[in-house]
Amino acid sequence: MAIDAARQHRARPGPGGGLLRLAPLALLLAGCTVGPSFLRPAPRAPAQWSRASLDAPAYARSRAEARAIDAAWWEGFHDPTLTLLVAQVEQGNPDLEEAAARIAETRESRAIAFAGFFPTLNANASDTRLRLSENSPFASIAGGRVSAGGGAPNAGQGAAIPTGPRPGFAIYQAGFDAAWELDIFGRTRRSIEAAEAEILGAERLLDNARLSLRAEAARTYLELRGLQARQAIARQSLRLQRDNAGLTRSRFASGFATEVDVANANALVAGTEATLPLLDAQVTQAMNRLARLLGQEPGALADRLAAPSPIPPAPPAVAIGLPIETIRRRPDVAAAEAALAAQTARIGVATAQLYPSLRINGSLGLQSGNTVNLFETASRFFSIGPSLIIPIFQGGQLRAQVRLEEARQRTAAIAWRRTVLDALHEVENALAAYYGDQGRRDALRRQAAAARQAANLARTRFAAGLGTFLEVLDADRTRLSAELSVAESSAAVATDLVAVYKALGGGWEPGH
């Protein structure tokens, strides 16, 4: 239920003083904006990253080193193909198109909210036919004839009896209606605040989608080069193993090897051959994932990426900055903060519904009982006056709406804190993987060098008749396993660095 206090003036008199009397009150209350104002939350972040991160040799400690890291982090791998793929992946990707469409949507929402500052104007025209009850006290205003006393004519007398008015008539009207609600308690202003926060959140979500897309393209490309490196190692090992198998068969024919040696040599060849189809399938799948990211059909990149290329080496240093800097530049954290700001503003929108609203209503037009004199000067009419609506009882709906928006704000605050916490853990975990895989890769490289030396010595000794084929077999298996592990670990270090850059917020300028 609401009280609607309105003052209207019709026909020729002026608008009167009601509007003027309410004007000072409207101006006094125009600055009242109810509901909480948004305050940027302070993230709980440690002053430094963990000791493991700070002590890592790849950490860029100096400000000069930090400035050397380009915002286009993927260019640090110095791979032209990777740079080109990252540039092309943003063209026509449906995920980015959807995020961009969301920005356009939120901007239109702001335009709708901003329209609340302006009055509305509508044109109208009507042709209304009315019939009042004959027993109505207003029936006398209508024309027509009925029998005296409301009965039928006396046919026996053969003469008409005077008749009274028939309660039916027509109204023809054309004109304009205008209404303007003053934003006294800030409902429109809070709606605009919410819409602007939604625009900012949509823009940050687009940044986050772009960051994720770049990282996924880089990670998939680096995985592809790692798989191709493992393919090359397996094929090279297969050639050596086939040579060993041929040598073993020759020595068996000469009586210097056993049939078991021949069987073991053939088994090693078959085992290596079995790894190639799996690697071929994984290479094809990686190419198809890249094609999907570029919005192309499966197999579209086969000719372009089929030629193996070395795994791009990861840069020796990475600027990680401080935890608070990471929180400020991550787009997902900024999007969560914008969602919290928008929800805070919606509390003000709901709170403003609890307060009176003041509207200025007006009408201007022509009105007549027939179309002949509708456009005469005497047919003009107007009405103008304020309308004050005071909500009194709505079944608890208005206050429940305020409580609902407050609950949603608490949910948004929890989501923001969770996003901050997840960001800090993501950086720490990415750094741990990056630094850990660097140490593992270096150790595997030393193992592979020693395994290659052992395999060459064992093969030389076996060819000279000084060693057994079992020594060759064991050494060759160790060498193959070590070399495959080095290729896998080198790719892991590169993809770990991509994860670090993504966790740090992607392209950024230190100190900004």
Image (cartoon, rainbow, N blue to C red):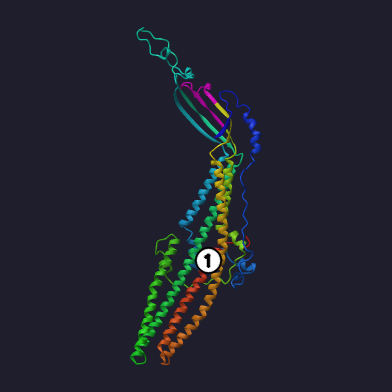
Residue 32: x and y in percent read 64, 41
Residue occupied by mark 1:
499
What residue sits 56% from the left and 55% below the top? Answer: 414
Magenta region: 361-381
- Picture quadrant where residue 120 is located: top right
Total marks placed: 1
Q: Nearer the viewer, residue 152 or 231?
A: 152
Task: Kindly identify the amino acid type of the residue bearing the numbered disc 1.
Answer: Ala
Q: Does residue 161 sit above or below 472 in this rendering?
A: above
Residue 396 image offset from top left, x and y in percent: 54, 40
Q: x, y (%) of residue 377?
A: 53, 22
Residue, x 58% and y 63% (percent of image)? Answer: 424
- Using the image, determine if residue 91 lies above or below residue 156: below
> Residue 1 or 299: which is nearer the viewer?
1
Between 61 and 136, which is closer to the camera in this rendering?
Answer: 136
Q: Position of residue 115 (x, y in %)?
A: 55, 41
